[in-house]
Image (tube, grey):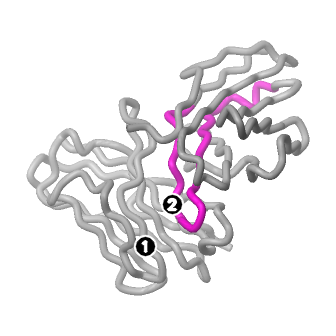
């Protein structure tokens, strides 16, 4: 089992550019979560999907952030336009479903916006 | 507002000692309380979890103590080892929900 796969692992971009982060959840998992981790704010849930449907996006900071899950094996988190304060590590996690709370995290994408 | 409050922010323990990390919550609808361990450059990974129908769960050197009336739970690491040095997050999940609310994390350093 390859676990949750995220790409890219590192991204450096300039302010104003569009950034797209990608995630492949564990096969068979029904739920997918996007988190952002910073020293100041810790681990924040941005959005999560059940069966490819967005359930709660209240953690998405602002309209510059958007997330999609076109199918059960792929999700994207897009930031457009990016700002320096978006610099963080972004994690994707998946879980088998509601009856089991365990979330399996990917290795994260470290985003630096200059 | 932080749904789960975690302390301390950082902790230094001698090898062989006991590490204790505490968490508190307010929402009585929470029914699942996991602890995650995160090493530098890695994503968090589930360490141990407990449900509120028991007061303690032990897995090897790791124990969760749960106090339902006080709405508090803690992680105890017995015989702490340098390899335990990591950031630990407590979390909670509401009944019928799928999302976790994480604490702010505790950076544990175990010195030889």
- Left or right for B49, reference B107: right
The location of residue A36, given as percent across then percent down, is 38, 49
Q: Could you tell me how many numbered marks the image carries?
A: 2
Question: Can residue B21 be seen in the rendering of this structure?
Answer: yes
- Farthest residue toward the bottom? A71
Q: Quadrant of the C terminus of chain B?
A: top right
Is B48 situated left or right of B92 in this image? right
Say which quadrant the N terminus of chain B sits in. top left
Point out the stretch of residues depicted in magenta: B81-105
| Label 2 element class | loop
Q: Quadrant of residue B56?
A: top right
The percent coordinates of residue A45 (x first, y second) are 41, 53
Between marks 2 and 1 in the image, the one whose residue lies nearer the viewer? 2
Q: Chain of mark 2?
A: B
Task: Give the crowd class for mark 2: few <14, some 14-19, many >=20 residues within 10 Å.
Answer: many
Give the CA distance from mark 2 to mark 1: 10 Å
Nearest to the observer: residue B65 or residue A61: B65
Image position of A19 with respect to A15: above or below:
below
Q: Percent x, y for residue B46? A: 68, 51
Tell me the SS state at disc 1. strand
**Residue A109: in sight, yes or no?**
no
Vertical arrangement, residue B23 with respect to residue A58, above or below: above
Q: Residue furthest left?
A: A16
Q: Mark 2 — residue?
A: B99
Q: Residue B69 magenta-drawn? A: no
Q: Is residue B100 left or right of residue B108?
A: left
Residue B72 image-quadrant placement: top right
For disc 1, the chain is A
Residue assigned mark 1 = A49
């Amino acid at each position: 089992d390859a676990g949750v796969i995220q790409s890219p692992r590192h991204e450096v971009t300039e302010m104003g550019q569009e950034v797209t982060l990608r995630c492949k959840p564990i096969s068979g998992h029904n739920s997918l979560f996007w988190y952002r981790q910073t020293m100041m704010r810790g681990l924040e849930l941005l959005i999560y999907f059940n069966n490819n449907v967005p359930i709660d996006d209240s953690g998405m900071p602002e309209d510059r952030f958007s997330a999609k899950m076109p199918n059960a094996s792929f999700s994207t988190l897009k930031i457009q336009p990016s700002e320096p304060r978006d610099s963080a590590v972004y994690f994707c996690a998946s879980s088998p479903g509601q009856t089991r709370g365990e979330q399996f995290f990917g290795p994260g994408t470290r985003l630096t916006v200059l | 507002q932080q749904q789960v409050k975690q302390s301390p922010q950082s902790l230094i323990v001698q090898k062989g000692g006991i590490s204790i990390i505490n968490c508190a919550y307010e929402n009585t609808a929470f029914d699942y309380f996991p602890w995650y361990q995160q090493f530098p450059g890695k994503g968090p990974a589930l360490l141990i979890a407990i449900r509120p129908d028991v007061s303690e769960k032990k897995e090897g050197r790791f124990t969760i103590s749960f106090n339902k009336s006080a709405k508090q739970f803690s992680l105890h690491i017995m015989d702490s080892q340098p390899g335990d040095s990591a950031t630990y997050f407590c979390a909670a999940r509401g009944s019928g929900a799928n999302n976790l609310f994480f604490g702010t994390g505790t950076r544990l350093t175990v010195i030889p």
